[in-house]
């Protein structure tokens, strides 16, 4: 799903108005109706009270349309129009006239009663056009909303959030109902406190405009993941499913390479070989009997050499940063010519020897967490600055970055693919090792590198989404990623059949 910037969202609106021969107010009515229908479906209890905060711009107009439809449908309602929140627009005035024509009133001083657990605040103060700090009087309203005991629904964007620069103060939304397109700002680490859940509502904007728009940013939806997914063929056997080699481990860190190897096999590849130091041999053969094992060194890897011909290699989990290991990695990189995934201490070794980045095969996949990424390419001032630096870094070295975070981003040839699966259950040691294994396993099965990264991240996050109803976020461990890979695949298969 393409992510549009503010300028092109407005252009999509204008094109729709022209091509569908409607007015801008009719488009506002359409947006408000879609939001109302979603609200009515999810809050059918007519004893639910809605307190709607409207600005004076078009976002406030959307709020007034929603408020009018709630009033007409019999919901208890209070509406505040915050005069300092923007300047009145013609469509806002039309929405206000339609609202008052029903007999509904807006009065910020009126009192109302509600049942506990049946109060919903609707935030319609500011939309995507906000380009300045809010007045102090409006900030007080936002503080009030954020301190409330009811659920908060924001319309299109959480009020106060900027689309093109860092946000320091905004409404904290439980549910964001946004129109037509995801917005990049919603998925940046610095904005995570303002949005808990996002629902994208289709308001029928011009399809040709959307199809022809060229974007650098994409949201990885279930439909996108299904396009990438390769179902296993009925005639498959272990020789056709690919052979993955996982290189890693050191004394005390054999678990990392074991997790990666297990995840590679569970991702669907036919064979897995683990290349580890001798201290991990008994552990690997006992904990993961399906794997073949090659060894080197006693407590850490001192050289990397093998006769087999894997289809893909993952290197780094638990490998350590010993000097002999570093030299072994340099020699390995100078010779490797198969699809490659680099993680963990192998990334830190690259960060200390940045000239070795030139040794990487084209489309090598690097999977850093934020600190590893900072060591690799240097720091950044804002999330927007980080994105631009990632684009430059990947182009400079012809690689693919999997920048792990709450919304992991895959950066490939100047394009950003933002993942939509996963939750806080993944915030536990070892889950990064399983991601390395999954992506390596997909590469071994023949997925092209960018698709292996995008689908691997999606599949990895989906395991946590599937699991938490059974295990909880707190009790989820890295091994649960491996355990729930099968159920994640079943969910993808079910979605595929429903298409």
Image: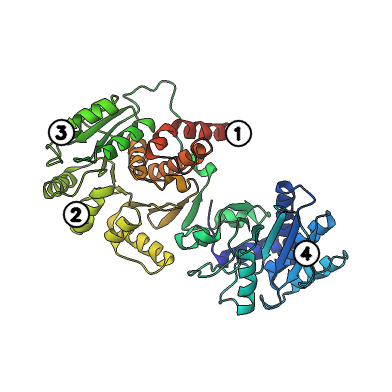
Specify which label sits upstream in the sequence, 4 or 2. 4
What is the quadrant of residue 478 in the picture? top left
Q: Nearer the viewer, residue 357 or 409?
A: 409
Q: CA distance from mark 3 to mark 1?
A: 49 Å
Please give the residue where the numbered disc 1 appears in the rendered image.
498
Eye-nearest disc, 3 or 2: 3
Residue 14 — which label? none
Residue 434 relative to residue 354: left or right: right
Task: Tell which circle, 1 or 2, labels the residue nearer the N-terminal end.
Answer: 2
Left or right? Give the position of 304 relative to 284. left
Q: Which element type, helix, strand or loop, lies under badge 1?
A: helix
Callout 1: 10 Å neighbours few (<14), some, many (20+)?
few
CA distance separating discs 4 and 2: 63 Å
Q: Quadrant of residue 210?
A: bottom right
Q: Is residue 20 visible?
A: no
**Residue identifier under label 3:** 278
Q: Tell me if residue 289 comes above or below residue 368 in the rendering.
A: above
Tell me the SS state at disc 3.
helix
Residue at figure coordinates x 56%, y 32% from the top left? 494
In this rendering, would 316 be left or right of 139?
left
CA gap, disc 3 and disc 4: 70 Å
Alpha-carbon neighbours of circle 3 within 10 Å: few (<14), some, or many (≥20)? many
Look at mark 4 in the image and give the residue it sits on.
Answer: 78
Structural distance between the alpha carbons of marks 1 and 2: 47 Å
1 vs 4, front mark: 4
Q: Is residue 142 visible?
A: yes
Q: Nearer the viewer, residue 180 or 102?
A: 102
Q: Nearer the viewer, residue 494 or 174?
A: 174
Labels 1 and 4: the sequence-earlier one = 4
Q: Which residue is mark 2?
A: 356
Where does the image place residue 269, in percent across and percent down from the top left?
35, 30
Whichever of callouts 3 and 4 sits on the residue coming sooner in the sequence is 4
């Amino acid at each position: 799903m393409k992510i549009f910037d503010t300028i092109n969202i407005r252009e999509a609106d204008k094109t729709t108005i022209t091509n569908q021969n409607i007015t801008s107010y009719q488009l506002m009515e359409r947006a408000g109706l879609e939001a109302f229908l979603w609200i009515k479906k999810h809050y059918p209890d007519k004893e639910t009270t809605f307190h709607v905060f409207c600005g004076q711009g078009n976002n406030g107009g959307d709020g007034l349309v929603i408020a009018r439809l709630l009033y007409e449908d019999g919901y208890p309602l209070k509406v505040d129009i915050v005069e300092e929140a923007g300047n009145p627009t013609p469509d806002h005035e039309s929405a206000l006239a339609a609202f008052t024509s029903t007999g509904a009133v807006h009065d910020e001083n009126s009192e109302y009663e509600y049942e506990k657990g049946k109060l919903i605040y609707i935030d319609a103060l500011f939309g995507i056009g906000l380009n300045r700090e809010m007045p102090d009087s409006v900030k007080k309203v936002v503080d009030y909303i954020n301190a409330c005991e009811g659920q908060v629904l924001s319309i299109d964007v959480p009020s106060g959030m900027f689309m093109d620069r860092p946000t320091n103060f905004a409404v904290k939304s439980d549910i964001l109902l946004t129109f037509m397109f995801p917005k990049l700002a919603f998925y940046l680490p610095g904005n995570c406190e303002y949005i808990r859940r996002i629902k994208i509502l289709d308001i029928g904007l011009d399809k040709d405009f959307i199809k022809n728009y060229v974007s650098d940013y994409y949201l990885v939806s279930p439909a996108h993941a299904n396009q990438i997914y390769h179902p296993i063929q009925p005639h498959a056997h272990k020789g056709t499913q690919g052979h993955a080699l996982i290189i890693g481990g050191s004394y005390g860190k054999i678990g990392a390479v074991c997790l990666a190897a297990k995840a590679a096999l569970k991702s669907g590849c036919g064979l897995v070989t683990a290349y580890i130091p001798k201290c991990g041999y008994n552990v690997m053969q006992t904990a993961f009997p399906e794997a073949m094992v090659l060894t080197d060194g006693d407590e850490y890897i001192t050289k990397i050499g093998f006769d087999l011909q894997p289809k893909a290699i993952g290197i780094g989990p638990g490998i350590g940063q010993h000097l002999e290991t570093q030299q072994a990695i340099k020699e390995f990189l100078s010779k490797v010519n198969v699809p490659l995934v680099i993680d963990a201490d192998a990334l830190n070794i690259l960060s200390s020897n940045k000239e070795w980045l030139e040794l990487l095969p084209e489309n090598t996949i690097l999977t850093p967490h934020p600190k590893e990424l900072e060591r690799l390419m240097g720091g950044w001032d804002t999330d927007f600055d980080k994105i631009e630096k990632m684009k430059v870094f990947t182009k400079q070295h012809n690689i693919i970055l999997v920048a792990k975070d709450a919304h992991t981003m895959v950066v490939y040839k100047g394009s950003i693919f933002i993942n939509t699966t996963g939750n806080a259950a993944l915030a536990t040691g070892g889950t990064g090792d399983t991601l390395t294994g999954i992506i390596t396993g997909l590469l071994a099965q023949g997925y092209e590198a960018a698709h292996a990264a995008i689908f691997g991240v999606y599949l990895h996050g989906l395991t946590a989404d599937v699991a938490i109803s059974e295990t909880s976020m707190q009790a989820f461990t890295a091994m649960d990623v491996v355990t729930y890979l099968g159920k994640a695949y079943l969910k993808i298969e079910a979605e595929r059949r429903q298409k």
